[in-house]
Amino acid sequence: MDAQQYLTEIKSRLIASPVVETFSIVDERDLDDRGYFRTRVTLTNADFLEVAEYFVIINDQPQPERYRYQWMDSTQKILRKRWDNVPHFPNLPNFPHHVHIDAEDNVQPSRPRSTTEFLAFLETEIFPEH
């Protein structure tokens, strides 16, 4: 897999996802063995999601280098959760991967996820019965 194939996979996943109502691509960069994707999403429950991932392709697989997945309410004022790997919580297990839950200062350890993995995870968060 190269960067273009992964970018195509992300867009296909957004189109097919049962939790995505609409999305608009803010930025997309294909640099062959690495790339960047940023999009704004309206979810089917009217919540807002912003996705940003800088990735590298290693052994034909995308690996997230820097990412931010920010899930907010429909007004975009209330944080539901934000997953990122900005290195500002060095004492957390699995540093730098973490999630902010309901507030900037409520932080828990997390794990890295590609955008496609994150979308699959989000589907289970919104539709746990599926």
Image (cartoon, rainbow, N blue to C red):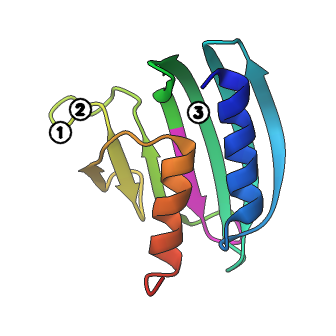
Q: Which mark is residue 95?
A: 2
**Rounded to the nearest whole Å, what is the CA distance between mark 2 and mark 1?**
5 Å
Picture layout, residue 11 above or below residue 45: above
* Residue 3 in which image quadrant: top right
Q: What's the amino acid at mark 2? A: Phe
- The residue furthest bottom is 129
Mark 3 residue element: strand
Circles 2 and 1 in contact, beta carbons < 8 Å: yes
- Principal secondary structure, stretch drawn in magenta: strand
* Magenta-drawn segment: 68-75
Residue at (60, 26) in percent of width and height: 1
Please state the horizontal and vertical placement of residue 18, each as a whole percent of the image: 67, 74
Cα–Cα gap, marks 3 and 1: 22 Å
The nearer-to-camera label among 2 and 3 is 3
Q: Residue at x 67, y 44 (%)?
A: 10
Q: Is residue 103 left or right of residue 48?
A: left
Q: Which mark is residue 46?
A: none
Residue at mark 3 = 53
Seen from the viewer's position, the closer of residues 106 and 86 is: 86
Label 3 crowding class (10 Å Cα cut-off): few <14, some 14-19, many 20+? many
